[in-house]
Amino acid sequence: MFYRLKYLTNEAFRTIQRHKGVASMSIVIMSLSLLMLAVFLLATDNLLKVIGQAQQEMKVYVYLDDSVDADGIQKLHHDLFSSPEVESVVFIPRDEALAEFRTRLTEEDAELLNALQTNPLPNSFWMTLKGEHRDHATLVNVAGRISQIAGVEEVRYGKDFIDKFSRIIRGIYYVDIVVGLIVILSALFIISNAVRLTVISRKRNIEILKLVGATNRFITVPFIIEGAFQGGVAAVFSLLLLFAITVASRRVVPELTFFSAEKSGIYLITCVVIGSLGSFAALRRYLKV
Amino acid sequence: MVQDYKKDRSVIGVYHISKKYGDQLALDDVSITVANGEFVFLVGPSGAGKSTLLRMIYMEEQPTDGQVVVGSFVSTQIRRKDIPYLRRKIGVVFQDFKLLDDRDVFENVAIAMRVCGAKSFEIKRKVTSVVNQVGLLHKRKDLPNKLSGGEQQRVAIARALVNSPAVLLADEPTGNLDPVVTEEILRLLFKINSGGTAVLMTTHDHELVKNFGPRVIHLCDGKLQEDTKTGLVGNLNDRLDTIQLERDRLKRIGARPYR
């Protein structure tokens, strides 16, 4: 069994060597169509990251009534934190809020502020929601609930901005899914064609193998290994090309990030699987092996 | 009807087979048995059904009616995945050689053993011996496209023999070869036959059969016309007509009729 597998593996690589032309041509075709796919995936990856960061900025400001004392503040802090959607609650004392406000003013305005004897700002909490709850509906829901609590004077969450932002995000998701489907389908179409040509170019050899009594496994195993190898090589090529493109694009968009090691690994494995399954499917379909 | 093939000493048993392609009747109630070690010519004009009959025997196709028995394989009972094991028990040789053009002579012969999972030392010993037997040991490292037609056919024969089959099927093996090489290949086939391997060879070359033929089966329009062993003789006029038709056809396509 082991001896057999070794022979069939060798056979796969010998075949690649014998048909260098066809093999390198299909690797080039696969690399380019995978590159197209990888560019799309990286763009989506970056987009999601940007959206995540923007959502991180989604804060709920809870302004308190001046009548709430230190104990009340403690209790409120606890209450707010105990709702399941909440990720963090930070208490901002009114003095701190004033100091913060001051830093944002010009010198002239700051003096104007000094003219006020008392601090006009209330105590407040800055809340962030957990990642999965950072959407418009939850925000409205949570804000509504909090505003009912005694001692809370006002709840703000940049309503207009978030309304618009979540509409844009939804639009981007739809476009991304549609573009993704088109890209994936065309990449698969191109790859399956390349594999089909390879298989058809070997049709005669396969018929001869069948005549001398080769089992289906004897015929398919080298093909699957070959397809996996080609898929892997094409994946590496497309990642290298994509990396070059990313580095070059950083001149324009410096924030652009490359795939994490984990995602690169998943991408590679997926390409290997696509390559081997593609070969197998083509054999089944065109040669009825 | 199932024949009692176990009592039968034959290596190939073809029992009342018919083959239809749509409305076309390619074979019509043909029965032939080939005994162990026998040499049989299957003669008939192009389109008589010779190749179809051979395809039924190596079970590339199934008959519409009747059954084919090869060794312990029965066409009506065989499963798809058993067919490779049948192919290892018979050697097949074709007019167009069917060699792997990206592998040298040695590998072309060795492949028939590799598909069976033979060990490499065994392969080396057996392939070397068979390649020597067909007289091509000095060319074992050459690619098929460097060989002449006759040499390529010798490689194909070596490949068919390397698993020591009980029977060798040869479909017009001399169809692409000139008379001198044809005779060489025939002598080689006779030599193989004298070693105990049954040979079933198709040809449309009547002259060849006259010169060499031990047992001759004549096929025409999918029907058995004559079998010199069983003494079956069809309508003689039919046969003469067929020969005349074949002559006319060859003349029409500009080929030189029989020598």
Image: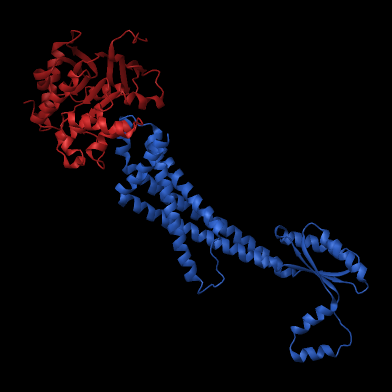
In the figure, A33 relative to A93: above or below? above
Q: In the picture provided, is B240 more to the left or to the right than A228?
A: left
Q: Residue at x 86, y 81 (%)?
A: A120
Colour of chain B in the rendered structure image: red
Circle count: 0
Q: Residue at x 80, y 82 (%)?
A: A99
Q: Residue at x 48, y 47 (%)?
A: A273
- Residue A235 image-quadrant placement: bottom left
State the quadrant of the N terminus of chain B: top left
Q: In the picture provided, is B89 more to the left or to the right than A176?
A: left
Q: Is residue A288 visible?
A: no
Give the x, y percent position of residue A93: 84, 75
Give the x, y percent position of residue A111: 80, 91
State the quadrant of the C terminus of chain B: top left
Q: Is residue B164 visible?
A: yes
Q: Nearer the viewer, residue B239 or A243?
A: A243
Q: In the picture provided, is A73 more to the left or to the right than A128?
A: right
In the figure, A204 relative to A154: above or below? above
- Residue A3 image-quadrant placement: top left
Q: Residue at x 32, y 26 (%)?
A: B88
Q: How has the structure been colored for display?
A: by chain
Q: Which chain is blue?
A: A
Give the x, y percent position of residue B75: 36, 19
Q: Nearer the viewer, residue B117 or B6?
A: B117
Give the x, y percent position of residue A288: 39, 34
Q: Nearer the viewer, residue A126 or B258?
A: A126
In the figure, A6 relative to A17: above or below? above
Q: Nearer the viewer, residue A240 or A32?
A: A240
